[in-house]
Image: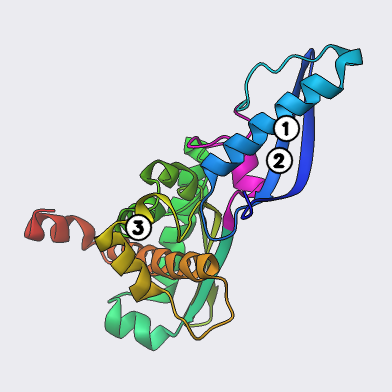
Amino acid sequence: SSHLHVMDSDVDVRGQYVFLTLFCDTDEAMGMNMVTIAAQAVGDWIVQNMQDFSPRLITIAGNVDSDKKPSRRTHDRGRGYEVTAKTLIPGTVISSMLKTTATDMAAVADAKLREGSEIAGALGANLHAANVIAALYLATGQDAAHVVEGSLADTTVELRGDDLAVSTRLPALLIGVRGGGTALPAQNQCLQMLLKNRTSLHPCRQLAESIGAAVLAGEISLLAAQTNQTLASAHKKHAR
């Protein structure tokens, strides 16, 4: 493919098995299909040209990439696009709009995101990043199964006087603006609403930024609802 560039590679050796990981730039596509075809070609080349070692290609997908699965490697190293979204919420906004205080939100965040996540052994300490990611993936024609990696997000909350600093790191947004479901009429229309023509920022990076901002907003909203004890009553009132 003229759109695929192999940027780097990595090797893990376990006994008789050698796992080769390819790091690729797939331009504006999510690109799993073109990477799969390229991996097959690389594997075939190794078998044909390194016969002194008698290599055998067992599979072109060895689970080291953890595609559509959660893993510590993906959480720590990232995969696809990595985004960090952050904001500082003034105390006046917290009291008037979120109906609580920065101190109380920070306390809930510490109990939930740090202690609760540690008890569960969670890969990704966030409130509900997957909800927002799933909605935007479906709306913009992404592979919904990649919500798994998207859920490996970490949200941190820091008290700064009467204000609150909130940050969310999304290490693995596997997205594209061409190919797959992005060509469907409704999904393409949603993409065009998010993408801006008059910018030098790559379209996929624009989409990643939009997802990051939406996730951060969702994290703040749910944290406030859990802090001021309106989460259950809202579900009961709206029956959803």
Q: Mark 2 points at which residue?
A: 22
Q: Of the residues shown, which amino acid type is indicated by label 1?
A: Val
The percent coordinates of residue 169 (x first, y second) are: 55, 60
Gap between marks 3 and 1, in whole Å? 30 Å
Q: Name the residue under label 3.
A: 183
Looking at the image, which is closer to me, 62 or 164?
A: 62
Whether residue 138 is visible to the viewer of this picture, yes or no, is yes
Residue depicted at x 35% and y 51%: 181
Is residue 207 rendered to the left or right of residue 27?
A: left
Task: Specify the segment rendered in magenta.
Answer: 63-81
Against 133, residue 54 (above or below) is above
Sequence-wise, the earlier of marks 2 and 3 is 2
Sequence-wise, the earlier of marks 3 and 1 is 1
Q: What element carries label 1?
A: helix
Marks 1 and 2: in contact by CB < 8 Å?
yes
Against 32, residue 55 (above or below) is above
Whether residue 158 is visible to the viewer of this picture, yes or no, is no
Residue depicted at x 13% and y 53%: 240
- Mark 3 packing: few (<14 Cα in 10 Å), some, or many (20+)? some
* Magenta stretch secondary structure, dominant: loop
Sequence-wise, the earlier of marks 2 and 1 is 2
Gap between marks 2 and 1, in whole Å? 10 Å
Tag of residue 42: 1
Looking at the image, which is closer to me, 211 or 35?
A: 35
The percent coordinates of residue 121 (x first, y second) are: 52, 36
The percent coordinates of residue 61 (x first, y second) are: 60, 27
